[in-house]
Amino acid sequence: MRATIAVLPGDGIGPEVTAQAVAALRAVAARFGHELTLIERVVGQQAILDEGTALSDETFDVCARSDAILFGAIGSLPARFARAGGARPEDALYRLRRGFDLFANIRPVLPLPELAAASPLKADIVAGTDLVFVREMSAGLYYGFSEDTALKPSRITGTGAETVAVDTLRYTRTEIERALRVAFELAARRRGHLTSVDKANVLSSSVLWRRCVEAIAPEYPMVTVEHLLVDACAMKLVQDPSAFDVVVTENLFGDILTDEASVITGSIGMLPSASLGPTRPGSAARSALYEPIHGSAPTIAGQDRANPLGAILSAAMLLRLSLQLPEEASAVEEAVAAVIRSGFRTEDIAEPATTVVGTTEMGELVAAHLTAPAGANLA
């Protein structure tokens, strides 16, 4: 098949890990005979320096013409690089999310058995964990900076002891229901259990969230629905993570809970994600952006120390969800597992008797497994 992918490496360790995800995609294309056109553009800090904005119109147009977006990471701009007008690297991601209406963020948590010792949780607690988060990502507190302050105020007013900060958590039924349907569909294809996480004992937005769940549930009789308050969910994630199948929640809760869940796998560097938008007019395809869930980690940028596996597994999600290539996606996932089984680790998941490698070598090992003849021993 032929496909075009916009590649936006971003800031910090973003270019390092994205380069290894790109190498995996090129290895897949060579192995399976696909033609992938990869168009790289700057976003974030470098784009502000070069183009005066975190995401130029030209880059946005490249993304709009592409079949999917592969994203690295972005981070706060050092004050010495700040531009007049207050452009920030994070503006790039917000524009992509708003511009393509990326409302459902999918984050799978599937620990590899060989990494059990890398998790701070006991191995018997981690064993059997296989869950997926669906995080609503188009509304909520993070969008309180809207220009329409009458609806979504986020501001600080007053001075001294009278200083007041206000953020507004706003959701519409439409915004909630479309994320819920993604979660219900996913649960129906998996083990048929959906945990909806809210704070309905305190927040009106969560009361509406729970009403929407109850309204949609009868359409999916094959799915068992469980409601869980966010604080109880945070506790259960580290007590009994294997009890979860699909977890759906709002924007802020999803951000926090998935970072917590990342320790189950041994490192936040292991988690991929997909951000999905509505289906495109006249097509079954969705707008979609794929990225590891970690940040730009500027303290280790350029040192060949970052874990690229979350980025590589994000490329696998791109193959499966946007390009409809499940065999190729599984090949990438198996290559990652094979490298881990062979004893190779980046420093964040290292343990005694394993071989610590850098970002580039880890990516090269995965690519080598993707291109090696069947049965080859690459250990």
Image: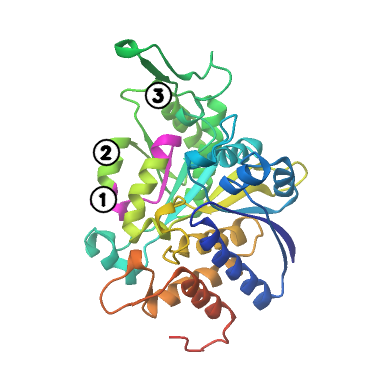
- SS label for mark 2: helix
Work out whether residue 329 can be spotted: yes
Tell me the number on the disc at residue 345.
none
Look at the numbered discs 2 and 1 and tell me whether their residues touch, using CB distance below 8 Å.
no
Seen at 64% across and 64% down, the residue is 325
Q: Quadrant of the N terminus?
A: bottom right
Which amino acid type corresponds to the residue marked 1 in the rendered image? Answer: Val
- Mark earlier in primary sequence (3, 1): 3
Between 13 and 351, the residue placed more toward the observer is: 13
| Dot 2 crowding, Cα within 10 Å, few <14, some 14–19, many 20+ | few
**Which residue, as the protein is rendered here, is positioned at the far right?**
282
Foreground of the two, 171 or 298? 298
**Position above or below: 166 against 124:** above
- Name the residue that disc number 2 marks: 232
Q: Secondary structure at mark 3?
A: helix
- From mark 3 to mark 1, how far is it between C-alphas? 26 Å
Q: Earlier in the sequence, mark 3 or mark 2?
A: 3
Classify mark 3: residues with Cα within 10 Å, few (<14), some (14-19) or many (20+): some
Residue on which the image places disc 3? 207
In the rendered view, tell whether residue 139 sits above or below residue 222: above
Circle 1: element type:
helix
Q: Which residues are magenta?
A: 237-254
* 115 and 175: which is toward the camera: 115
Is 4 left, or right, of 125 in this rendering?
right
Residue 50 lies, in percent from the top left, at: 66, 46
Q: Is residue 170 above or below residue 334?
A: above
Label 2 vs label 1: CA separation? 10 Å
Specify the label residue 238 is tagged with: 1
User: As drawn, which residue projects farthest toward the bottom?
Assistant: 376
